[in-house]
Amino acid sequence: MSKDIFISYSTKDTDITDKIHDYLEDKGFSCWMAPREIKPGDDYSQKIIDALNSTKIVLLVFSKSSHASEYVTEEIDNAFSRDVPILPFKIDETLPEGKMEFYLRHSQWLDASSNPEDYFPELLKHADRLCKGKRIETPKPKPADQVRVIEPPKRPILSYILVAVIAIIAVVGGFMLFSGTGDSSGDVNETGISVDFIELDDDTGKGYSWKYSYFVYGTVSSDLSNSTDNTLHTDFLDKSGKVVTSNETKVDDINDNTLASVYLDDNNVDKVSVELRDGDGKVLYSARSNNIKSVGG
């Protein structure tokens, strides 16, 4: 059975991890934690892999002990390679180095080193946000005034031929159509993707290792979002057009119109560029936006 949260930890931190597990379970989350979920005679390694394959997020109880644990590193490596959201919960003053620093460089940290139990409510809030982005059930429909229904008009066959000819000319000529609010150019491509806005959350003073959060909201048309081979590649750009950082999101992981997110030390993102790519890396559609909406301080 799939679980909401896979807890990765060192057995030397069992006492605090047990409290984390029980707190989250009491709040309605299902948690996978070894060895609780492993029965006598089970293949230990296989059970861990199975749990990682089916979980919504991985909660890393980060400490000096877990940083040094080969098993914890392998679990985080597996989650990273499968693009499973990782939420590090830092319970001492240890900082990530080497492989762990690479795996966690874009993850959202919670520094609870002063007193971990005081940060359980904050942990709950972020676990809930990340898990909702991974819910298996169908999202609740939006109000009618927020739903954009795109239905192709009925046209005679000659119109379809004309549209096809125009499309071929556009491709050969190297035109690229961009959609989205902000700095869109050309016609809005109703069968591709759009970027609605970029949400900036000022996290200074909240105790995180990063200071600013960016969330990119938009839509991918239903016929494209049904393909598990397609991914969204998002570049976060500064004012000069230089790429600050990038993000890859599987199309079938998109929920609540969140196309991408990133956490940075500096408030230096001016716009985003999003490309929908197929399994071979071919760009299918592109969209850009500099419509940044500040929501916090």
Image (cartoon, grey):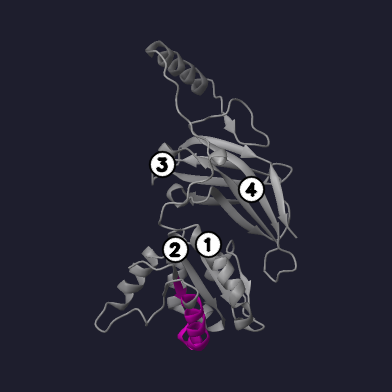
Which residue position holds label 3? 280
Q: Amino acid at mark 2?
A: Lys
Relative placement, left or right, of 237 versus 107 is right
Q: Amino acid at mark 1?
A: Leu
Q: CA distance from mark 4 to mark 2?
A: 25 Å
Which residue position holds label 4? 236
Q: Which tag, 3 or 1, sits closer to the chain's start?
A: 1
Q: Looking at the picture, how far across and down is residue 31, in whole percent? A: 43, 74
Which image quarter is the C terminus in? bottom right
Density class for disc 4 (Cα within 10 Å; few <14, some 14-19, many ≥20) is many
Q: Looking at the picture, how far across and down is residue 97, in whole percent? A: 58, 72
- Residue occupying image coordinates x 43% and y 13%: 159
Q: Secondary structure at mark 4?
A: strand
Marks 1 and 3: in contact by CB < 8 Å?
A: no
Pair 4/2: label in front: 2
Which residue position holds label 1? 130
Of residues 254 and 186, the one nearer the viewer is 254
Q: CA distance from mark 4 to mark 1?
A: 21 Å
Mark number displayed over residue 56: 2
Pair 4/1: label in front: 1
Q: CA distance from mark 2 to mark 1?
A: 8 Å
Q: Which tag, 4 or 2, sits closer to the chain's start?
A: 2
Region of the chain picked out in magenta, as a range: 6-25
Relative placement, left or right, of 5 versus 114 is left
Q: CA distance from mark 2 to mark 3?
A: 26 Å
Q: Looking at the picture, how far across and down is residue 238, in whole percent? A: 71, 46
Pair 3/4: label in front: 4
Marks 1 and 2: in contact by CB < 8 Å?
A: yes
